[in-house]
Image (tube, rainbow, N blue to C red):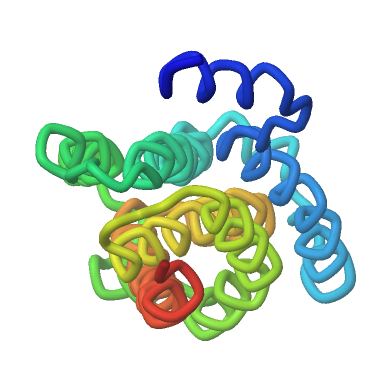
Amino acid sequence: MDTDQLIRSLAADNAHRAPRVGTVLTMALLVAAPLSILIFATFLGVRSDVMSAMHNPFFDMKFAVTLSLAIPAIIVSLHLSRPEALLRGWGWLLLLPVGLLAVAIGGEAMMAPAMPMSMRLMGKNSRVCLLAIPAMSLPLLAGALFGLRHGAPSHPALAGALAGLVSAGLAATLYASHCTDDSPLFVATWYTLATALVAAVGALAGSKVLRY
């Protein structure tokens, strides 16, 4: 038996197959999600006027922005979980929420303002936003890092930052149903700051736990 035949025989005899990174990541996020939901339900909850808020396009916009961050971040993080993968050619996906926010801010600017720009920017919940999104992100970040550990990213800090974007995007989706500040200016400022904080934590953690 030559070497190639031996390798094929050993592979055929090995019934165990390592689970795909995407499968592990999905399961890890599903396990972590109830903890984030518990934090949301215990300390925040859905805003009381949610039924009427659904008729406000800027309320709906918040979910479009957060999901347009979380979903592409999952796709890019799975791509980067391969050792030969580079961000080049994939990073544009992460600009989708930026484009949506730019359109929403432009749309709001063309409308008769209901309140001054400074009030739309600062809102009423900036401090809550900066605390709630990172807090709800932590269980999801741990799950995302666990899932990506089953890959072999050649840039562990970058992969960790992507895990942070995944978890922050999902946590911000939860938070958006509580937040009564619907202005795109508020979302662009405070959601972004909270997300950047989680991404920084993810990059720091990823540089250690995703290194191989």
Tell whether 178 sits left or right of 172: right
Q: Quadrant of residue 54?
A: top right
Q: Residue at x 58, y 82 (%)?
A: 131
Q: Is residue 3 above or below residue 174?
A: above
Front position in the image: 169 or 9: 9
Q: Residue 181: where, in percent of width, then height?
A: 50, 61
Q: Quadrant of the C terminus?
A: bottom left
Q: Residue at x 81, y 61 (%)?
A: 45
Q: Residue at x 18, y 44 (%)?
A: 86
Front position in the image: 188 or 139: 139
Front position in the image: 76 or 50: 76
Q: Residue at x 57, y 70 (%)?
A: 133
Q: Is residue 3 above or below residue 190?
A: above
Tell whether 183 sits left or right of 99: right
Q: Residue 129: where, in percent of width, then height?
A: 53, 74
Tell whether 95 sits left or right of 160: left
Q: Is residue 32 visible?
A: yes
Q: Is residue 14 above or below residue 49?
A: above
Q: Is residue 190 visible?
A: no
